[in-house]
């Protein structure tokens, strides 16, 4: 089955700096890579996702890059703001994996004002 | 607004006393999931339904059961809660047919076992 590893587990940045979170996956058949943001005590919410037919996707201050050869994908947040502070989870799935989504272990991002 | 609703938001139960958590959705999605999330951990899939087809994860304890009487509702039954079952329980839905579709999460039910 799929295995997703996420690093770092905690990340502290100064407001306005960039933050990068990296994930690796094991199943070369994986073709869908979402990122979820979970604020304290709240539900995980999808912030961006990418499919394996593209290498990069951007939505305002958030971007995701995918390297299929190396089997890793990354979340980039630019111009971080205190409200970006949350736990971020990467995940991977494939059309062959039934309905399962395999999550990474999460990264706690703290943006200091 | 279309959404995933969980009730109750907070549930306190006694050790060994059965408890049922509920989830409903107005998204008309085929797939409904139940996850267990403990502090500072990723959500752990317990089981899911694709329409009426039930899929149990191999390591989900027998103490956890689920029912999906119709498209809109799904229930999580914990037959004999232990202290280790205290967690946030998240319901999610997706339009399927595979895992490569966005999952929409409910707000969760925080279960406390005393």
Image (cartoon, coloured by chain):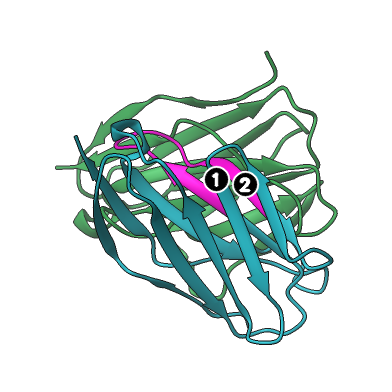
State which mark lies toward you, 2 or 1.
1
- Please report, as a chain letter, where disc 2 is located: A
Magenta residues span A35-49
Give the labeled residue for mark 1.
Answer: A62
Q: Are marks 2 and 1 in contact (CB under 8 Å)?
A: yes
Residue B107, percent from left and from top: 46, 30
Q: Tell me, yes or no, whether the highlighted magenta stretch contains residue A39.
A: yes
Residue A66, percent from left and from top: 66, 69
Tag 1, which secondary structure?
strand
Crowding around mark 2 (Cα neighbors within 10 Å: few <14, some 14 to 19, many 20+) is some
Which residue is at the front of the view, B110 or B3?
Answer: B3
Say whether mark 1 and mark 2 are on the same chain. Answer: yes
Which residue is at the front of the view, A101 or A108?
Answer: A108
Give the labeled residue for mark 2.
Answer: A48
Which residue is at the front of the view, A24 or B15?
Answer: A24
Residue B98, percent from left and from top: 80, 59
Kindly report the distance in space between the C-alpha atoms of the residues bearing marks 2 and 1.
8 Å
Tag 2, which secondary structure?
strand
Quadrant occupied by the C terminus of chain A: top left
Q: In the visual, does A51 lie left or right of B68?
A: right
Q: Which chain is green?
A: B
Q: Which chain is cyan?
A: A
In the picture, the disc for residue A8 is none
- For marks 2 and 1, the one nearer the N-term is 2
Query: Compared with residue B1, is residue B108 higher up or lower down, i.e. above or below?
Result: below
Q: In the visual, does A44 lie left or right of A19?
A: right
Query: Compared with residue A91, is residue B91 higher up or lower down, i.e. above or below?
Result: above
Q: In the visual, does B23 lie left or right of A29?
A: left
Is residue B69 visible in the rendered structure shown here? yes
Magenta stretch, main secondary structure, is: strand
């Amino acid at each position: 089955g799929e295995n997703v590893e996420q690093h770092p587990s905690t990340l502290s940045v100064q407001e306005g700096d960039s933050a990068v979170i990296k994930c690796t996956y094991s199943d070369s058949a994986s073709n869908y890579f979402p990122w979820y943001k979970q604020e304290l005590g709240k539900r995980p919410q999808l912030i961006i996702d990418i499919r394996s037919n593209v290498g990069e996707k951007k939505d305002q201050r958030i971007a995701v890059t995918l390297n299929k050869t190396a089997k890793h994908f990354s979340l980039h947040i630019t111009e971080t703001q205190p409200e970006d502070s949350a736990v971020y989870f990467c995940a991977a799935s494939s059309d062959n994996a039934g309905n399962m989504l395999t999550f990474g272990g999460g990264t706690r991002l703290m943006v200091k004002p | 607004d279309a959404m995933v609703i969980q009730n109750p938001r907070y549930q306190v139960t006694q050790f060994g006393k059965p408890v049922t958590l509920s989830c409903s959705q107005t998204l008309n999605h085929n797939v409904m999931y139940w996850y267990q999330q403990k502090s500072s951990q990723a959500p752990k899939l317990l089981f899911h339904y694709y329409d009426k087809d039930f899929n149990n994860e191999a390591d989900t304890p027998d103490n956890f059961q689920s029912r999906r009487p119709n498209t809109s509702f799904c229930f999580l039954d914990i037959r004999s809660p232990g202290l280790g079952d205290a967690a946030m329980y998240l319901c999610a839905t997706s339009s399927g047919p595979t895992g490569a579709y966005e999952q929409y999460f409910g707000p969760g039910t925080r279960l406390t076992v005393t």
